[in-house]
Structure formats: structure tokens, C-alpha cells
Amino acid sequence: MKTLPDYLAHGLDIVFVGLNPGLSSVEAGHYFANKRNRFWPALNASGLLRVPVDSSTDHLLLNEGIGFTDVVKRPTRGSSDLRAADFRKWAPVLREKLERYQPLVACFHGVTAFRNFLKYSEGGDEAVALGPQRLTIGNSATFVVPNPSPANAAYSHDDIVRWYRKLKAFLAELRRADGSASANPGNA
């Protein structure tokens, strides 16, 4: 199966967790490669990065303390093509990856991604809202932001930017509480 590689390493500040790779991203070989996806414009506007990045340079974010993976690694045209079997197979694999790499924050793109992760890796079926979550995965805090997909019209570009700024503030709080240094000095 051709899919996107994980961009994971020890000591990351944030690992962005998507629902699953889109076909256009897999064809391009980069995260959020669909030109209509709002991830890169919103992330660049949020202040989380020192320099602007786009899908063609997504791998460089490892140097900024940011990684990428997905709840389900099977690419599809849209989320409606995912099945319960996909989540049963892949959600426990994601849990193992996050426990192994221990980012400060596992940031899930969308309530659907986090809800399905909970259901199929934790056996939970609770209501999920945007923002910080009670669940920790190993030592990693969890946070949910709106899915930046163009199919998610409920949230504007400005809404998504605000949520990435809230993520940045949450990360700064975690660092203050922990007294830890940042992998990304521009991220503090």
C-alpha cells in the first residue's frame, strides 16, 4: 500500500495527527498537498513556525519540532471511504507510535479523528470537543483542532488560525509547567 511516511522522532513538540492521507497527498508524497486544504496557510499565519513552510517542504518541520502521522494510514478519496476495520487496525498502531516517540502534544486534526482514535484504541466513546483533552498517551498531552480539509466548511481559515494559536499557547503552558526547553526556539 502506498501511503505517506510518518515524520516522527524523539523530542518533538507537536505531532499533527490527521484522519488519513488523501489521494492527492499520497500522489504528491507530502502532507496536505491538496491546494484547497487550509492547513499550510493557517499554520503559517498562526505563529507556530519561524519560517513559512508548504507541503513540498513538510519534512523540514522535524527540525522545528513538528511531526506528522495519521490515525489510519490507508489513503482514500474522502473520509466517508473509511470503515470500522480501518480504525480497528490502525488506531492501536498510532497509540504505539505516540507512546514510542512521546511528543509533548499529539494534536488531532478534527473531532472525527480523535473520536475514532478513542473508540478503537481506548475503547472510549465519549463526546469530544476542540481544544485540550483529558487523555494523555504515555506522557503526551492531546489537543484537537478543526480539520483543515476543504470539505470541513464549518470552520473558516481564521477559525483554524485561532485554534493553532490556542495550540501554541497550550504548548507554552506545558513547557512552563514542565520546565522543559523547546525543540523549536521560535515556538515558545
Image (cartoon, helix red, strand yellow):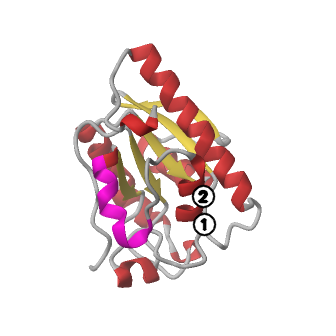
Which residue is at a point 42% across and 39% down the rendered structure image? 186
Q: Quadrant of the N terminus?
A: bottom left
Write the residue at 36% across / 57% down: 69
Write the start and end of the magenta stretch as one range: 54-63
Element carrying mark 1: loop
Which residue was labeled with disc 2? Answer: 42
Q: Give the residue at x 46% y 59%.
A: 52
Q: Is residue 78 left or right of residue 139?
A: right
Q: Residues within 10 Å of mark 2 (few under 14, many from 20)?
A: many
Along the viewing direction, whichever of 96 and 179 lies nearer the viewer: 179
Label 1 sits on residue: 38
Q: Is residue 103 above or below residue 91?
A: above
Query: Magenta stretch containing residue 151, yes or no?
Result: no
Q: Position of residue 175 (x, y in %)?
A: 43, 22
Q: Position of residue 29 (x, y in %)?
A: 33, 77
Say left or right for 148 vs 102.
right
> Would you say residue 61 sits in the magenta stretch?
yes
> What secondary structure characterizes most of the magenta part?
helix
Q: Is residue 176 above or below residue 106?
A: above
Residue type at numbered disc 1? Arg
Image mark for residue 179: none
